[in-house]
Amino acid sequence: MTGRAVMAIVLLLGCACGASAQQPGGRIDLDRFAEVLTGLVSIGAAFVEDGPAVCPEDQVLLKISRGVLTQLRAATEPARPPLQLVEQKAIDDETRVHQYQTFGCRIDLTVRMQVLTDGAWRPLLVPRKTGAEWLAEARERAERLSPEELRKRVDSFREQQTAGWSFGRVATNSASFSFDQAPADCFQAVGEYVLHRNGITFSFPTNLPGDLNRFAIERSDLDDDHARFYFVRDACRFELTIGKSVLRGGQWFAVPLAPPTLPSPAQRP
């Protein structure tokens, strides 16, 4: 993707226009907005106001490519004051969680990936290898390269870095959700999510080049306390579930979802 295209995406993410929805069920097909210039499709979930606890906040660029969901943020961006702890971990064989926690409030964003097989959605497994194991394997592969090939790769990497910085590239931190046997031809997407005191909002720009953001968003809540979203196209989908808890008397209690609000007639697709 060219720098100009990236800049266009950033500008589009700043728009407050387009379709918007916060519903306990339903589907938004981003293909329907593919020709809408400077459009933005947003969908979110809110929780009931629950006391004075200071809850986590975050704003993250979201990218889906080759079966991997990645969170990106500028490395120079200062930490948000209420944020005390961010942790990503596997909680079972099929689920990874990105957990935000302050002293009295916690947000859990869980991610699963599924593929359609024989008419049924089958979950993919979380990789069992640790980060240290991946690094060890990468080091072993590098050691097997000839000195000439290793020098070429190092020189190529340095050229890319130099070109990037001269263009004004900003260093980023990233966290990726990957799964075993994820299909490389899964859909591609770029957008953002904003985590705020009352919940979460996902936003995706329209009218992007190629197959970017040509997928559907479905909402089907897990229960009264957890909002669930599916990002889906053809035989591939990501499942994202968000829950909020507050600390009372040394124990965490789930906060219920707020009643749904329907978009105004002007916002409806």
Image: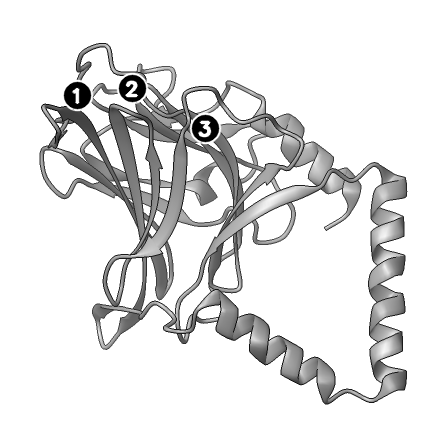
Q: Residue at x 14, y 20 (%)?
A: 259
Say few, some or many: other residues with alpha carbon within 10 Å of mark 2 (under 14 / 14 to 19 / 20 or more). Answer: some
Q: Which residue is mark 3?
A: 58
Q: Nearer the viewer, residue 235 or 53?
A: 53
Q: Nearer the viewer, residue 251 or 148?
A: 251
Mark 1 and mark 2 lie on one chain; the one further toward the N terminus is 2
Mark 1 and mark 3 lie on one chain; the one further toward the N terminus is 3
Q: Which picture quadrant has residue 202? A: top left
Amino acid type indicated by mark 2:
Asn
Q: Which residue is mark 2?
A: 198
Amino acid type indicated by mark 1:
Ala
**Label 2's element?**
loop
Q: Which residue is mark 1?
A: 258
Q: Residue furthest top?
A: 52
Name above or below for residue 1 compared with residue 30: below
Measure the C-alpha gap from mark 1 to mark 3: 20 Å
